[in-house]
Amino acid sequence: MKINKEEIMLKNNLACPGCSASLAMRLALKALGKKTVVVIPACCWTVINGTTGFNHAGVPVFHTAFETTAAVASGIKVALRRGGETGVTVMGWAGDGGTFDIGLQALSGAAERNEDIIHVCYDNEAYMNTGIQRSSATPIGAETTTTPPPHLKSRPKKDIMTIMEAHNIPYIASATVGFPIDLTKKFEKAKKTKGFRFILIFSPCPPGHKFPENKTITISKLAVETGIFPLYEIDNGRYKLSRKPSKFLQLEEYLQLQGRFKNTTKEQIEQIKDNIRNMWKRLNLRFQDEAITKMLTRD
Ligand SMILES: Cc1ncc(C[n+]2csc(CCOP(=O)(O)OP(=O)(O)O)c2C)c(N)n1
Ligand SMILES: [Mg+2]
Protein backbone atom coordinates (compact mmCIF):
# COMPACT_ATOMS: atom_id res chain seq x y z
CA MET A 1 0.00 0.00 0.00
CA LYS A 2 1.29 3.45 -0.90
CA ILE A 3 0.47 6.80 0.65
CA ASN A 4 -1.11 9.22 -1.86
CA LYS A 5 1.63 11.49 -3.29
CA GLU A 6 -0.75 14.41 -3.76
CA GLU A 7 -0.38 17.06 -1.05
CA ILE A 8 -3.62 18.69 0.05
CA MET A 9 -2.23 20.59 3.01
CA LEU A 10 -0.15 23.65 2.15
CA LYS A 11 3.44 24.23 3.25
CA ASN A 12 4.64 26.58 5.99
CA ASN A 13 1.85 26.19 8.48
CA LEU A 14 2.25 27.58 12.01
CA ALA A 15 2.90 24.31 13.86
CA CYS A 16 5.89 24.00 16.18
CA PRO A 17 8.82 22.02 14.69
CA GLY A 18 8.22 18.29 15.14
CA CYS A 19 4.45 18.68 15.63
CA SER A 20 2.74 15.33 15.12
CA ALA A 21 -0.70 16.97 14.93
CA SER A 22 0.39 18.75 11.76
CA LEU A 23 1.71 15.53 10.20
CA ALA A 24 -1.44 13.66 11.27
CA MET A 25 -3.67 16.13 9.38
CA ARG A 26 -1.40 15.93 6.33
CA LEU A 27 -1.76 12.14 6.25
CA ALA A 28 -5.48 12.19 7.06
CA LEU A 29 -6.27 14.57 4.19
CA LYS A 30 -4.16 12.56 1.75
CA ALA A 31 -6.41 9.59 2.57
CA LEU A 32 -9.73 11.48 2.64
CA GLY A 33 -9.13 13.64 -0.46
CA LYS A 34 -10.11 17.18 -1.36
CA LYS A 35 -13.85 16.73 -0.90
CA THR A 36 -13.50 17.09 2.83
CA VAL A 37 -14.74 19.77 5.22
CA VAL A 38 -12.90 20.07 8.53
CA VAL A 39 -14.41 21.42 11.74
CA ILE A 40 -11.88 22.66 14.30
CA PRO A 41 -12.60 23.87 17.83
CA ALA A 42 -10.24 25.95 19.96
CA CYS A 43 -6.97 23.98 20.05
CA CYS A 44 -3.43 24.09 18.59
CA TRP A 45 -4.87 23.45 15.15
CA THR A 46 -6.69 26.80 15.30
CA VAL A 47 -3.21 28.32 15.32
CA ILE A 48 -1.54 25.82 13.00
CA ASN A 49 -4.03 26.60 10.22
CA GLY A 50 -2.86 30.22 10.07
CA THR A 51 -4.07 33.68 10.91
CA THR A 52 -7.08 35.34 9.24
CA GLY A 53 -6.90 34.95 5.49
CA PHE A 54 -4.78 31.80 5.60
CA ASN A 55 -5.97 28.22 5.46
CA HIS A 56 -3.10 25.78 5.43
CA ALA A 57 -5.36 22.73 5.58
CA GLY A 58 -6.10 23.23 1.87
CA VAL A 59 -9.78 22.22 2.29
CA PRO A 60 -12.68 24.23 3.79
CA VAL A 61 -12.19 24.67 7.53
CA PHE A 62 -14.91 25.81 9.93
CA HIS A 63 -13.58 27.14 13.24
CA THR A 64 -15.97 26.61 16.09
CA ALA A 65 -16.32 26.94 19.86
CA PHE A 66 -14.41 24.53 22.06
CA GLU A 67 -17.37 22.37 23.15
CA THR A 68 -19.24 22.12 19.85
CA THR A 69 -17.14 20.20 17.29
CA ALA A 70 -19.35 17.14 16.81
CA ALA A 71 -22.60 19.19 16.88
CA VAL A 72 -21.29 21.61 14.24
CA ALA A 73 -19.89 18.82 12.07
CA SER A 74 -23.27 17.03 12.26
CA GLY A 75 -25.07 20.21 11.12
CA ILE A 76 -22.68 20.80 8.24
CA LYS A 77 -23.14 17.23 7.01
CA VAL A 78 -26.94 17.54 7.11
CA ALA A 79 -26.84 20.91 5.33
CA LEU A 80 -24.63 19.47 2.59
CA ARG A 81 -26.93 16.49 2.16
CA ARG A 82 -30.01 18.73 1.98
CA GLY A 83 -28.23 20.77 -0.70
CA GLY A 84 -27.65 17.62 -2.73
CA GLU A 85 -23.92 17.30 -1.89
CA THR A 86 -23.63 13.68 -0.89
CA GLY A 87 -19.96 13.00 -1.62
CA VAL A 88 -18.37 15.28 0.98
CA THR A 89 -16.64 13.87 4.04
CA VAL A 90 -17.15 15.98 7.15
CA MET A 91 -14.44 15.57 9.77
CA GLY A 92 -14.37 17.08 13.25
CA TRP A 93 -10.72 17.52 14.27
CA ALA A 94 -10.28 18.24 17.96
CA GLY A 95 -7.62 17.92 20.62
CA ASP A 96 -7.92 15.79 23.75
CA GLY A 97 -9.45 18.77 25.61
CA GLY A 98 -12.04 19.17 22.84
CA THR A 99 -12.79 15.42 22.87
CA PHE A 100 -12.20 13.82 26.30
CA ASP A 101 -13.32 16.87 28.30
CA ILE A 102 -15.26 19.86 27.06
CA GLY A 103 -16.38 18.38 23.72
CA LEU A 104 -17.58 15.09 25.22
CA GLN A 105 -21.26 15.98 25.44
CA ALA A 106 -21.56 17.02 21.78
CA LEU A 107 -19.43 14.02 20.80
CA SER A 108 -21.60 11.57 22.74
CA GLY A 109 -24.80 13.09 21.32
CA ALA A 110 -23.58 12.91 17.73
CA ALA A 111 -22.28 9.35 18.22
CA GLU A 112 -25.56 8.20 19.76
CA ARG A 113 -27.49 9.67 16.80
CA ASN A 114 -24.97 7.94 14.50
CA GLU A 115 -24.38 11.16 12.55
CA ASP A 116 -22.52 10.59 9.30
CA ILE A 117 -19.26 12.26 10.32
CA ILE A 118 -15.71 11.37 11.35
CA HIS A 119 -14.50 12.69 14.70
CA VAL A 120 -10.73 12.69 15.07
CA CYS A 121 -9.02 13.38 18.34
CA TYR A 122 -5.35 14.26 17.99
CA ASP A 123 -4.36 13.40 21.51
CA ASN A 124 -1.33 15.29 22.81
CA GLU A 125 -2.41 14.51 26.35
CA ALA A 126 -2.83 18.09 27.64
CA TYR A 127 -4.22 21.54 26.80
CA MET A 128 -1.13 22.50 24.81
CA ASN A 129 -2.42 25.60 23.02
CA THR A 130 -3.10 27.44 26.28
CA GLY A 131 0.18 26.49 27.97
CA ILE A 132 0.29 22.75 28.81
CA GLN A 133 -2.49 22.34 31.38
CA ARG A 134 -3.53 18.79 32.35
CA SER A 135 -6.57 17.21 30.69
CA SER A 136 -8.31 13.93 31.45
CA ALA A 137 -6.08 12.44 28.74
CA THR A 138 -2.88 13.30 30.64
CA PRO A 139 -1.26 10.11 31.97
CA ILE A 140 -0.35 9.42 35.61
CA GLY A 141 2.98 10.92 36.64
CA ALA A 142 3.11 13.54 33.89
CA GLU A 143 4.20 17.09 34.64
CA THR A 144 2.05 19.92 33.27
CA THR A 145 1.73 23.54 34.38
CA THR A 146 -1.29 22.54 36.51
CA THR A 147 0.40 19.36 37.78
CA PRO A 148 3.88 20.68 38.63
CA PRO A 149 6.25 18.52 40.69
CA PRO A 150 5.68 17.18 43.29
CA HIS A 151 1.95 17.33 42.41
CA LEU A 152 2.22 15.29 39.21
CA LYS A 153 -0.97 13.95 37.62
CA SER A 154 -2.29 11.34 40.02
CA ARG A 155 -5.31 10.00 38.12
CA PRO A 156 -5.12 7.63 35.15
CA LYS A 157 -5.84 8.69 31.59
CA LYS A 158 -9.53 8.46 30.68
CA ASP A 159 -10.32 5.48 28.43
CA ILE A 160 -12.00 7.31 25.56
CA MET A 161 -11.88 4.29 23.22
CA THR A 162 -14.09 2.29 25.60
CA ILE A 163 -16.41 5.27 26.05
CA MET A 164 -16.83 5.49 22.28
CA GLU A 165 -17.28 1.72 22.00
CA ALA A 166 -20.23 1.99 24.40
CA HIS A 167 -21.98 4.11 21.75
CA ASN A 168 -22.14 1.16 19.31
CA ILE A 169 -20.85 3.18 16.39
CA PRO A 170 -19.72 1.57 13.12
CA TYR A 171 -16.01 2.37 13.25
CA ILE A 172 -13.45 3.16 15.95
CA ALA A 173 -9.67 3.13 15.52
CA SER A 174 -6.48 4.22 17.24
CA ALA A 175 -3.48 5.41 15.21
CA THR A 176 -0.27 7.39 15.43
CA VAL A 177 2.07 9.11 12.97
CA GLY A 178 4.84 6.60 13.80
CA PHE A 179 2.85 4.09 11.72
CA PRO A 180 1.73 6.23 8.76
CA ILE A 181 0.53 3.39 6.52
CA ASP A 182 -1.63 2.01 9.30
CA LEU A 183 -2.99 5.52 9.94
CA THR A 184 -3.72 6.01 6.22
CA LYS A 185 -5.55 2.67 5.94
CA LYS A 186 -7.74 3.60 8.89
CA PHE A 187 -8.71 6.94 7.32
CA GLU A 188 -9.46 5.19 4.03
CA LYS A 189 -11.68 2.72 5.85
CA ALA A 190 -13.36 5.52 7.80
CA LYS A 191 -14.07 7.38 4.55
CA LYS A 192 -15.86 4.35 3.11
CA THR A 193 -17.89 3.69 6.27
CA LYS A 194 -21.31 5.32 6.78
CA GLY A 195 -22.33 6.71 10.14
CA PHE A 196 -20.28 7.90 13.08
CA ARG A 197 -16.58 7.13 12.98
CA PHE A 198 -14.04 7.89 15.70
CA ILE A 199 -10.26 7.92 15.31
CA LEU A 200 -7.89 8.57 18.20
CA ILE A 201 -4.41 9.68 17.10
CA PHE A 202 -1.67 9.60 19.69
CA SER A 203 0.19 12.86 19.02
CA PRO A 204 3.55 13.50 20.72
CA CYS A 205 4.21 17.22 21.30
CA PRO A 206 7.86 18.40 21.59
CA PRO A 207 7.27 21.53 23.74
CA GLY A 208 4.47 19.97 25.80
CA HIS A 209 6.07 16.59 26.43
CA LYS A 210 9.53 18.17 26.56
CA PHE A 211 11.55 16.24 24.01
CA PRO A 212 13.72 17.28 21.04
CA GLU A 213 11.74 17.94 17.87
CA ASN A 214 13.48 15.13 15.95
CA LYS A 215 12.12 12.48 18.34
CA THR A 216 8.41 12.70 17.41
CA ILE A 217 8.38 9.55 15.30
CA THR A 218 10.59 7.60 17.74
CA ILE A 219 8.21 8.46 20.59
CA SER A 220 5.11 7.63 18.50
CA LYS A 221 6.59 4.20 17.80
CA LEU A 222 7.73 3.63 21.37
CA ALA A 223 4.21 4.38 22.66
CA VAL A 224 2.99 1.44 20.59
CA GLU A 225 5.93 -0.89 21.21
CA THR A 226 5.80 -0.42 25.00
CA GLY A 227 2.07 -1.20 24.97
CA ILE A 228 0.97 2.16 26.43
CA PHE A 229 -0.88 3.06 23.20
CA PRO A 230 -2.33 -0.04 21.49
CA LEU A 231 -3.17 0.22 17.80
CA TYR A 232 -6.51 -1.41 17.03
CA GLU A 233 -9.85 -1.07 15.30
CA ILE A 234 -13.43 -1.87 16.27
CA ASP A 235 -15.05 -2.33 12.91
CA ASN A 236 -18.81 -2.87 13.27
CA GLY A 237 -18.18 -4.48 16.64
CA ARG A 238 -15.30 -6.65 15.41
CA TYR A 239 -12.03 -6.06 17.23
CA LYS A 240 -8.84 -6.11 15.19
CA LEU A 241 -5.38 -5.61 16.60
CA SER A 242 -3.39 -3.59 14.06
CA ARG A 243 0.03 -4.21 15.51
CA LYS A 244 0.76 -7.20 17.62
CA PRO A 245 3.71 -6.66 19.92
CA SER A 246 5.78 -9.86 20.20
CA LYS A 247 7.19 -8.47 23.42
CA PHE A 248 6.51 -5.12 25.05
CA LEU A 249 9.58 -2.89 25.22
CA GLN A 250 10.43 -1.52 28.66
CA LEU A 251 8.15 1.42 29.46
CA GLU A 252 11.16 3.36 30.75
CA GLU A 253 12.49 3.57 27.15
CA TYR A 254 9.42 5.67 26.34
CA LEU A 255 9.31 7.69 29.57
CA GLN A 256 12.97 8.67 29.72
CA LEU A 257 12.90 10.50 26.39
CA GLN A 258 10.33 12.97 27.72
CA GLY A 259 10.98 15.74 30.23
CA ARG A 260 7.35 15.58 31.42
CA PHE A 261 8.21 12.28 33.16
CA LYS A 262 11.49 13.53 34.66
CA ASN A 263 10.05 13.61 38.19
CA THR A 264 7.70 10.63 37.89
CA THR A 265 8.11 8.43 40.95
CA LYS A 266 8.87 4.69 40.90
CA GLU A 267 5.42 4.04 42.38
CA GLN A 268 3.77 6.03 39.58
CA ILE A 269 5.76 4.10 36.96
CA GLU A 270 4.57 0.85 38.55
CA GLN A 271 1.00 2.20 38.48
CA ILE A 272 1.29 2.99 34.77
CA LYS A 273 2.69 -0.50 34.13
CA ASP A 274 -0.21 -2.06 36.06
CA ASN A 275 -2.69 0.01 34.09
CA ILE A 276 -1.10 -1.05 30.79
CA ARG A 277 -1.28 -4.70 31.80
CA ASN A 278 -4.94 -4.36 32.88
CA MET A 279 -5.82 -2.52 29.68
CA TRP A 280 -4.28 -5.31 27.57
CA LYS A 281 -6.03 -7.97 29.66
CA ARG A 282 -9.33 -6.22 28.95
CA LEU A 283 -8.53 -5.82 25.27
CA ASN A 284 -7.39 -9.41 24.96
CA LEU A 285 -10.80 -10.61 26.14
CA ARG A 286 -11.80 -9.37 22.66
CA PHE A 287 -8.67 -10.22 20.66
CA GLN A 288 -8.38 -13.69 22.23
CA ASP A 289 -4.76 -13.80 21.11
CA GLU A 290 -2.76 -16.68 22.61
CA ALA A 291 0.62 -14.96 22.27
CA ILE A 292 -0.69 -11.92 24.14
CA THR A 293 -2.26 -14.11 26.83
CA LYS A 294 1.15 -15.77 27.33
CA MET A 295 2.91 -12.42 27.45
CA LEU A 296 0.46 -11.13 30.06
CA THR A 297 0.75 -14.15 32.32
CA ARG A 298 4.58 -14.00 32.25
CA ASP A 299 5.93 -11.97 35.15
C1 LIG B 1 -15.24 27.40 26.56
C2 LIG B 1 -13.77 27.60 26.44
N1 LIG B 1 -12.97 27.36 27.50
C3 LIG B 1 -11.64 27.54 27.40
C4 LIG B 1 -11.08 27.98 26.25
C5 LIG B 1 -9.61 28.22 26.18
N2 LIG B 1 -8.91 27.21 25.41
C6 LIG B 1 -8.65 27.37 24.10
S1 LIG B 1 -7.78 26.10 23.44
C7 LIG B 1 -7.72 25.32 24.93
C8 LIG B 1 -6.96 24.03 25.08
C9 LIG B 1 -7.24 23.03 24.02
O1 LIG B 1 -6.68 21.80 24.39
P1 LIG B 1 -6.84 20.56 23.44
O2 LIG B 1 -8.25 20.40 23.05
O3 LIG B 1 -6.18 19.40 24.09
O4 LIG B 1 -6.02 21.00 22.13
P2 LIG B 1 -4.44 21.37 22.04
O5 LIG B 1 -4.33 22.79 22.45
O6 LIG B 1 -3.70 20.47 22.95
O7 LIG B 1 -4.12 21.17 20.61
C10 LIG B 1 -8.39 26.05 25.91
C11 LIG B 1 -8.49 25.67 27.35
C12 LIG B 1 -11.93 28.23 25.15
N3 LIG B 1 -11.46 28.63 23.97
N4 LIG B 1 -13.26 28.04 25.28
MG1 LIG C 1 -4.32 18.59 23.72
Image (cartoon, rainbow, N blue to C red):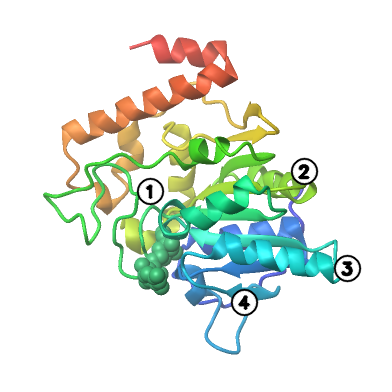
Asked which secondary structure carries label 2, the reply is loop
Mark toward the start of the polypeptide (2 vs 4): 2
Labels 3 and 2 touching (C-beta < 8 A): no
Mark toward the start of the polypeptide (3 vs 2): 2
Q: Residue at x 31, y 25 (%)?
A: 274
Residue nearer the viewer, 197 or 82: 82
Compared to residue 262, the image places residue 22 above or below, namely below
Residue type beneath disc 4 = His
Labels 1 and 4 touching (C-beta < 8 A): no
Residue type beneath disc 1 = Ala
Q: Residues within 10 Å of mark 1 (few under 14, many from 20)?
A: many
- Cα separation, mark 3 vs mark 1, equals 38 Å
For disc 1, the marked residue is: 137
For disc 3, the marked residue is: 84
Judge whether residue 177 can be spotted in this image: no
Residue type beneath disc 2 = Met
Q: Residue at x 66, y 54 (%)?
A: 118
- Cα separation, mark 3 vs mark 4, equals 27 Å
Q: Residue at x 70, y 33 (%)?
A: 236
Labels 2 and 1 touching (C-beta < 8 A): no
Residue nearer the viewer, 227 or 193: 193
For disc 4, the marked residue is: 56
